[in-house]
Amino acid sequence: MSERNGSTRAEAPSPVDLASDAEDDARPALGWAAGSILVASLFLLLTNAQALNGWAAEQEPSETMVRVTGATEGWLAATERMQVAAPREWLHGVWKRAQAVRFPGQAPAEGD
């Protein structure tokens, strides 16, 4: 209860108020967030090896980056053999075809 201008009224808690109990800590929420990040990272590592390989190839050449690039090329080849990369390749093809679409009379895009 709060006192305001001599009257008392009950304050309704906000629907976004967080509990302030000492027993209530952020560990469950952090665990959930960490688990979500881990699942998303593993999914992307498995299904988007092309992006990882592209990143490695764009880095400044060094002995370490040569090894990293070799590892990413091997991972890319492995995902292609397992056909895990097929959905990405299909979607990439759809995207490229959509990019190539032109209005009647429009000049072709650069590189066409």
Image (tube, rainbow, N blue to C red):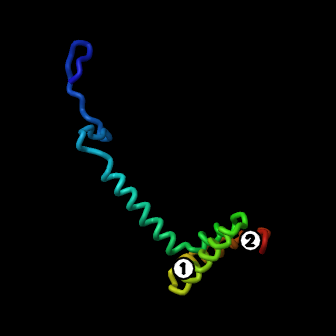
Q: Residue furthest bottom?
A: 81
Q: In x, y percent, where is residue 69?
A: 64, 73
Q: In x, y percent, where is residue 55?
A: 64, 66
Asked if disc 2 and disc 1 are in contact, CB closer than 8 Å, the reply is no
Q: Which comes sooner in the sequence, label 2 or label 1?
A: 1
Quadrant housing residue 38:
bottom left
Q: Which residue is mark 1?
A: 85
Amino acid type indicated by mark 2: Pro
Q: Secondary structure at mark 2?
A: loop
Q: Is residue 50 above or below residue 38?
A: below
Amino acid type indicated by mark 1: Ala
Number of numbered discs visible in the structure rendering: 2
Between marks 2 and 1 in the image, the one whose residue lies nearer the viewer:
1
Q: In x, y percent, where is residue 57?
A: 68, 70
| CA neighbours of label 2 inside 10 A, class few (<14), some (14 to 19), many (20+) | few
Taking 38 as reference, is 45 left or right? right
Q: Is residue 22 above or below residue 8?
A: below
Q: Secondary structure at mark 1?
A: loop
Taking 40 as reference, is 66 left or right? right
Q: In x, y percent, where is residue 111?
A: 78, 72
Which one is nearer the viewer's eye here, 45 or 93?
Answer: 45
Which one is nearer the viewer's eye here, 11 or 86?
Answer: 86
**Which residue: 55% across, 76% down?**
88
Quadrant housing residue 67:
bottom right
| CA neighbours of label 1 inside 10 A, class few (<14), some (14 to 19), many (20+) | some
Q: Is residue 7 above or below residue 52?
A: above
Give the numbered dot on residue 104.
2
